Image (cartoon, coloured by chain):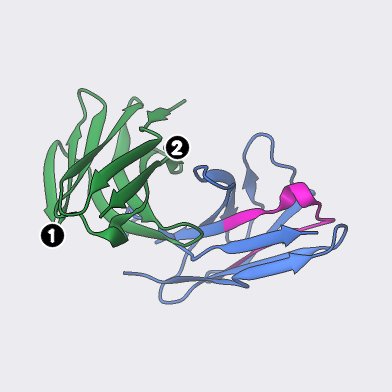
């Protein structure tokens, strides 16, 4: 199976930078995804990594190291609206998405 | 990106009744759709994979007779919660992906349906 781990909760200050880590155990996959979810709302796609390295998309960046089974989502210039849950998910070969437990981020003024 | 819709967005029903939730892919054909449930402050758990024109594949521990899935067309899958009980109250989310061979690996998620069983 796949074990995916994320910190349960994080707190950061408006304007700061926060890094949300995700570790996983799987033999191979078709990519690692990050999603944002505000309470009771739909998932919003943030990023997709299939190769090692950093993918940058505005204030959001995602990093992947396949050899280490590790990814992180980096949020810069935090805004209050960034308070949400952030879920990483992997899609193993021939299988469906497996989601991590999610990290609830609280951005304080 | 592709759009997936769900209807209804919220539903409240009495214990013992059945509730149908629709999931539609609006601008692409989805041979495969997925149904998830999410309890408060928890992550998404895959319930079943819905395949157009064939039976759904259920995850371990999910009662197929309780959660009926029908994928009658390439743009519509329905989940029916039969004889609903308060413990079925949850956020139900569907997703869809492009057919194999399109090169698209992303799944597109619907906005979710919040079911409350009284």
- Compared to residue B67, the image places residue A104 above or below, namely above
Specify the segment rendered in magenta. B77-92
Where is the N terminus of chain B found, in terms of image quarters?
bottom left
Specify whether B49 is left or right of A69: right
Pointer 2 indicates a residue of which chain? A
- Compared to residue A35, the image places residue B12 above or below, namely below
Residue B91 inside the magenta-drawn segment = yes
Occupied quadrant, residue B20: bottom right
Specify whether B61 is left or right of B39: right
Q: Residue furthest front?
A: A109
Specify whether B39 is left or right of B4: right
**Residue carrying label 1:** A58
Please give the letter of the chain rendered in blue.
Answer: B
Residue B96 inside the magenta-drawn segment = no
| Residue located 46% across and 60% down the image | B96
**Residue carrying label 2:** A101
Q: Residue furthest bottom?
A: B27
Chain A color in figure: green
| Residue located 52% across and 45% down the image | B41
In terms of depth relative to the viewer, which is nearer, B15 or A30? Answer: B15
How crowded pointer 2 is (Cα within 10 Å; few <14, some 14-19, many 20+) is rated as many
Q: Position of residue B69 (x, y in %)?
A: 68, 57
């Amino acid at each position: 199976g796949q074990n995916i781990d994320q910190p349960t909760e994080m707190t950061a200050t408006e304007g700061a930078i926060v890094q949300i880590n995700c570790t996983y155990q799987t033999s191979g996959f078709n990519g690692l995804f990050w999603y944002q979810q505000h309470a009771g709302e739909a998932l919003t796609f943030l990023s997709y990594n299939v190769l090692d390295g950093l993918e940058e998309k505005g204030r959001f960046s995602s990093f992947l190291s396949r050899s280490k089974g590790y990814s992180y989502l980096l949020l810069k210039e935090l805004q209050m609206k960034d308070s949400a849950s952030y879920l990483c998910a992997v899609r193993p070969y021939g299988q469906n998405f497996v989601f991590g437990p999610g990290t609830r981020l609280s951005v304080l003024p | 990106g592709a759009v997936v819709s769900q209807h209804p967005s919220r539903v409240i029903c009495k214990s013992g009744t059945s509730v149908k939730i629709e999931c539609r892919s609006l601008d692409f054909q989805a041979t495969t759709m997925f149904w998830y449930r999410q309890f408060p402050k928890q992550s998404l758990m895959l319930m079943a994979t819905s395949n157009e024109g064939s039976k759904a594949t259920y995850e371990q521990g999910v009662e197929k007779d309780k959660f009926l899935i029908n994928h009658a067309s390439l743009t519509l899958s329905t989940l029916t919660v039969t004889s609903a009980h308060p413990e079925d109250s949850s956020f139900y989310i569907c997703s869809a992906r492009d057919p194999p061979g399109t090169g698209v690996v992303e799944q597109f998620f619907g906005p979710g349906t919040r079911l409350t069983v009284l």
